[in-house]
Amino acid sequence: MLTRCAVLGSPIAHSLSPVIHRAAYRQLGLDWEYTAHEVGEAELPAYVGALGPEWRGLSLTMPLKRAALDVATTVSDVAATVGAANTLIRRDDGGWDADNTDVPGVVATLREAGAAVAAPVCVWGGGATAAGVLAALAFLESGPVHVHVRSEARAGAALAVAAALGHPAEPAPWAVLPACADAGVTVSTAPAGALDELSRQVAAGAAAGAERPRRVLFDVVYDPWPTPVAAAWQAAGGVVAGGLDLLVHQAAGQLRLMTGADVPADLLRSAALAAIGART
């Protein structure tokens, strides 16, 4: 019987998950199938309920990460804390185990970038992605976090995650503050273009000969890339990690859950970059 896995979401045509997972299957010598399916939030319970025993695992992207918890038989501690799951693994009894590999993916991305997490951390955006970032920062025992949002109410769920994990985090206005200069890590979970003003300030500081410490920017966007703030940050001498790095590391975690094997992140990254190059 052919073993099947897939990524579900809406929209889904842009997803690089099939490219990444199929590259892993080739590396592992697995004759498995991995496909992409357009599934909306309301459709998820019926879709998952109709899957046969040949299905091993599902990757969930937006808008399904919260809805995935409702179709699961069990939910991992990290998925329950963050309130979102990006992975469903088929159980022997036909049920599904929900997990979240985004959080360990953030941890791996920051470690790979050499982020100085002991210093304060500046997070832009307060949505579901920010909640996962705050959970990862708690795991890394980072310095205190200030979370920039246009409305404090928007950051409620993300800040609740930090509070549940006993990690210091507080809301901040949507403006570059003096405290931002002390951050060892700046994380943008905002849409492309939202931090163009920050990119202009970074560029202006570099032009003025400002001190350029080895600080890390982690921008979760991967298309289009680089974002203006990522380009300015790198030009100013900073270290940049992007959404593609997170995509690769969270996929490595999913592959471990689905296949029981580890696949090198560099192999997955190369497959994704080749696919992006082919598109452009």
Image (cartoon, rainbow, N blue to C red):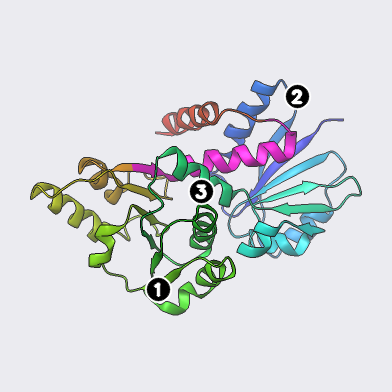
Read off the residue under disc 3.
106
Mark 3 vs mark 2: in front:
3
Element at badge 2? loop
Q: Is residue 13 magenta?
A: no
Q: Is residue 56 left or right of residue 119?
A: right
Q: Is residue 216 left or right of residue 37?
A: left
Q: Is residue 225 left or right of residue 36?
A: left
Q: Residues within 10 Å of mark 3 (few under 14, many from 20)?
A: many
Q: Residues within 10 Å of mark 1 (few under 14, many from 20)?
A: many
Q: Is residue 43 visible?
A: no
Instruction: Specify which label sits upstream in the sequence, 3 or 2.
Output: 2
Instruction: Specify which label sits upstream in the sequence, 1 or 3.
Output: 3
Which residue ends up furthest to the left in the rendered image? 208
Q: Residue at x 9, y 47 (%)?
A: 209
* Residue type highlighted by circle 1: Pro
Q: Residue at x 19, y 55 (%)?
A: 200
In this picture, which residue range is highlighted in magenta? Answer: 240-261
Q: Which mark is residue 44?
A: none
- The one nearer the camera, 33 or 156, is 156
Q: Is residue 249 magenta?
A: yes
Q: Residue at x 40, y 53 (%)?
A: 118
Cα–Cα gap, marks 2 and 1? 48 Å
Read off the residue under disc 2.
31
